[in-house]
Image (cartoon, rainbow, N blue to C red):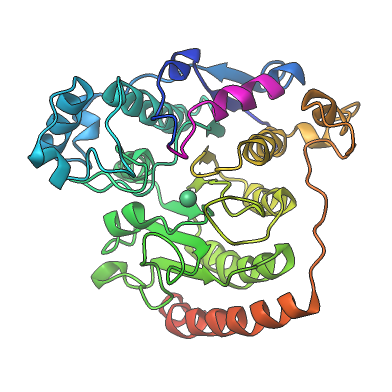
Amino acid sequence: MATHKAVFIYSSELEKYKYPSDHPFNTIRPAKVRKVLNSMGLLSGEGRKEVAPVPAERIVLKKFHSARYLHALQAASKSRWDRDAFNMGIGTSDCPVFKGLYEYAVLAAGGTLTGANLILSGSANIAFNPSGGFHHAGPEHASGFCYINDVALACTVLAEQRKRVLYLDVDVHYGDGVAQAFYDRSDVMTISFHENPRMLFPGTGFEDEIGTGKGKGYCVNVPLPIGTYDKAYIKAFKEIALPLIKVYNPDVFVFQLGADALAGDPLAHLYVTNNLYVEIINHLLSFNKPILATGGGGYNIDNTVRAWALAWTILCGADSEQGMNPALGGVMLESIEWQGGLRDKQLPVSTEQRKSVMPTLDATIDTIRTKVFPIHGL
Ligand SMILES: [Zn+2]
């Protein structure tokens, strides 16, 4: 991108809220990312700044969520929780009730909408809200640790301004809430790479779920076998996502960068490193269109923090700057045994692993190319 106007969206206000201590979702991750980036000097200076999220307004939330659901969420946040709320997924073990839940969800989602508005006004061409990415929430239900679907809302707001939106989701779980929201629409194309839903929540997101009506061919799901590694993943990305993005020619990207596909995540079974994210981000940047990026899953905290900090260095163009010390991130993260900075070490891939991943993945790629590509004249 010619000139970066990159905005990192964060407020220490977000640190006040916490899921119960035994819950895997940790709201501390963005604060840790911010700390690393701040000590590297990457949140200010030419073309970079930090902006505080503005809580999402009720009128905007209602573009995706029902009034009944928002009311139940707000009441639960004040400890007025009932069976009706439970039936909407509020107060389950995945989506527990905790103090300030509504305020947290609205502020975190507000960050993504703040980014969307900065992009729409031309004040930013890169915006990253590591506190966003709640892709499982539905119009009237909480699901998979998500209450307010900030990414679906951002796509809606951008599409309302006649932007062609390309939603890319690399969280290890299928971005079902967003895909469903635009399942019959062609002005928001959703592409989701995720672990095979036979193995993992939410149990949908197979390659034959391709949208319906006007949206047929505009929902693209790439289920990945257990043990998928960087090279296999990037092959699927190049053979599926790149040609579709080229032909779709979006005005803006909404990029859900859940980091739970990383090897070592306690909730999933893929085997990728953060070098994969660098490669994907560089591909997105090559289209020279604004990118609204969010966080998402990521349950190995250290790996997630490093991946998101690294993602920002690429998104804001710092990696190509003279004098940028690539080992600095390593020092900041107090890692003494690895001097590669924020980048992960390459992981060894066994012949066995190659044999179990590649044939399945190749078959998936074939299916998608057969079902989806002709719709786009490919
Ligand atoms: Zn996830």
Magenta residues, start to end:
23-37
Residue 316 sits in quarter: top right
* Observer able to see residue 12: yes
Residue 25 included in the magenta stretch of the image: yes
Q: Quadrant of the N terminus?
A: top right
Image coords of residue 156 (percent x, y): 31, 44
Instruction: Identify the residue shown where x is 36% and y is 60%.
Output: 202
187 lies above or below 80: below
Instruction: Identify the residue shown where x is 77% and y is 31%.
Output: 318
Residue 290 included in the magenta stretch of the image: no
- In the picture provided, is 181 more to the left or to the right than 10? left
Image coords of residue 214 (percent x, y): 27, 68
- In the picture provided, is 303 more to the left or to the right than 268? right
User: Mostly what secondary structure, the magenta segment?
Assistant: helix
Q: Nearer the viewer, residue 131 or 32?
A: 32
Instruction: Identify the residue shown where x is 52% and y is 62%.
Output: 193
Q: Nearer the viewer, residue 199 or 311?
A: 199
- In the picture provided, is 295 more to the left or to the right than 318? left
* Observer able to see residue 1: no
Residue 134 sits in quarter: top left
Image coords of residue 90 (percent x, y): 22, 39
Q: How many marks?
A: 0
Instruction: Identify the residue shown where x is 48% and y is 28%.
Output: 27
71 lies above or below 350: above
250 lies above or below 5: below
